[in-house]
Image (cartoon, rainbow, N blue to C red):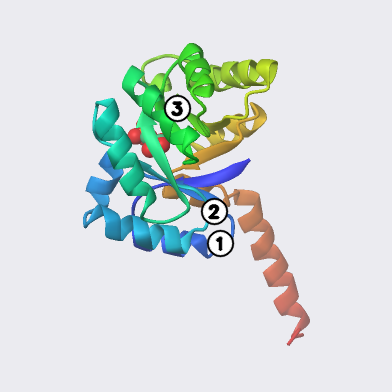
Amino acid sequence: MKIFIDSADVKELQTLAQTGLVDGVTTNPSLVAKAGGNIFDGLRAICAAIPGPVSAEVVAADYETMLAEGRKLRTVASNIAVKVPLTPDGLRACATLSKEGHPVNVTLCFSAVQALLAAKAGATFISPFLGRLDDGGQDGMELVREIRAIYDNYGFKTQVLAASIRTTLHVRDAALAGADCATIPPAIFKALYKHHLTDAGLESFGKDWRATGQSIL
Ligand code: E4P
């Protein structure tokens, strides 16, 4: 499963890129607002730090303006993926941009039939928001499983990008459900490394090693 980071914080992303584990980034208007600064400067820096797809979202609601915004966002760097919302205009823009060769991430997906439409519109990525479904008392991971089954039934190439991840268990379950990618907030990404038995094991190995009085270097 590819690991994307869900953030527009340039410094944070530059640091996380050093792990060598980050395959891409997703941003959205709220994340850009939270990070502050100019959207184009931020995207340029993120695209330079992380060679994988960096999703940049259009903010228009109508087809023509979405197309113009998507094409402009794509001039920032070759690894930009245009993010469009799952609306009739958004999917129409997805189809046009995809035909022009632009990678498109269809966002704000909350049902399997929406995901079916996005695949038919040629989306490169579909982003089911599982955390927001969970927040509302639905089973977000079930949506990821349904989309996986539908895409596999028909051989759709659209990648399932599990989004709105809230916990490390979401990451595990998205991988078990066969998501192609998961976009993970920085704090959850860092938590993936953690296990108390790793810490305890390291401490006891260190103690025993120090008692030998030896040095490897
Ligand atoms: C995905 O591309 C979105 O940016 C993101 O996952 C939304 O997550 P949230 O529900 O935590 O805002």
Residue mark closest to the camera, 3 vs 2:
3
Furthest residue toward top = 113
Task: Kindly state the secondary structure of the residue where label 3 is placed.
Answer: helix
Residue 41 is left or right of residue 193, and the answer is: left
Q: Tell me where residue 93 sits by quadrant.
A: top left
Q: Total label count?
A: 3
Nearer to the camera, 114 or 73: 73
Quadrant position of the N terminus in the picture? top right
Q: Does the residue labelled 2 lie within 8 Å of ligand 1?
A: no
Which residue is painted at 78% across and 80% down in the image?
212
Residue 199 is left or right of residue 190, and the answer is: right
Q: Which amino acid does label 1 sit on?
A: Thr
Q: Tell me where residue 67 sits by quadrant.
A: top left
Which residue is painted at 45% across and 27% down in the image?
95
165 vs 80: above or below: above
Task: Kindly state the secondary structure of the residue where label 1 is placed.
Answer: loop
Tell me residue 17's x, y (percent). Answer: 50, 61
Compare marks 1 and 3 and give the one earlier in the sequence.
1
27 vs 75: above or below: above
The answer to whether marks 1 and 2 mark residues whose Cβ atoms lie closer than 8 Å is yes
14 vs 151: above or below: below
Residue 167 is left or right of residue 151, and the answer is: left
The mark found on residue 95 in the picture is: 3
The quadrant of the picture showing ligand 1 is top left
Residue mark closest to the camera, 1 vs 2:
2
The mark found on residue 19 in the picture is: 1
Tell me residue 196's x, y (percent). Answer: 60, 50
Residue under circle 2? 22
Nearer to the camera, 38 or 145: 38
Q: What residue type is labelled 2?
A: Val
Q: Tell me where residue 61 sits by quadrant.
A: top left
Circle 1 packing at 10 Å, graded few (<14), some (14-19), many (20+), is few
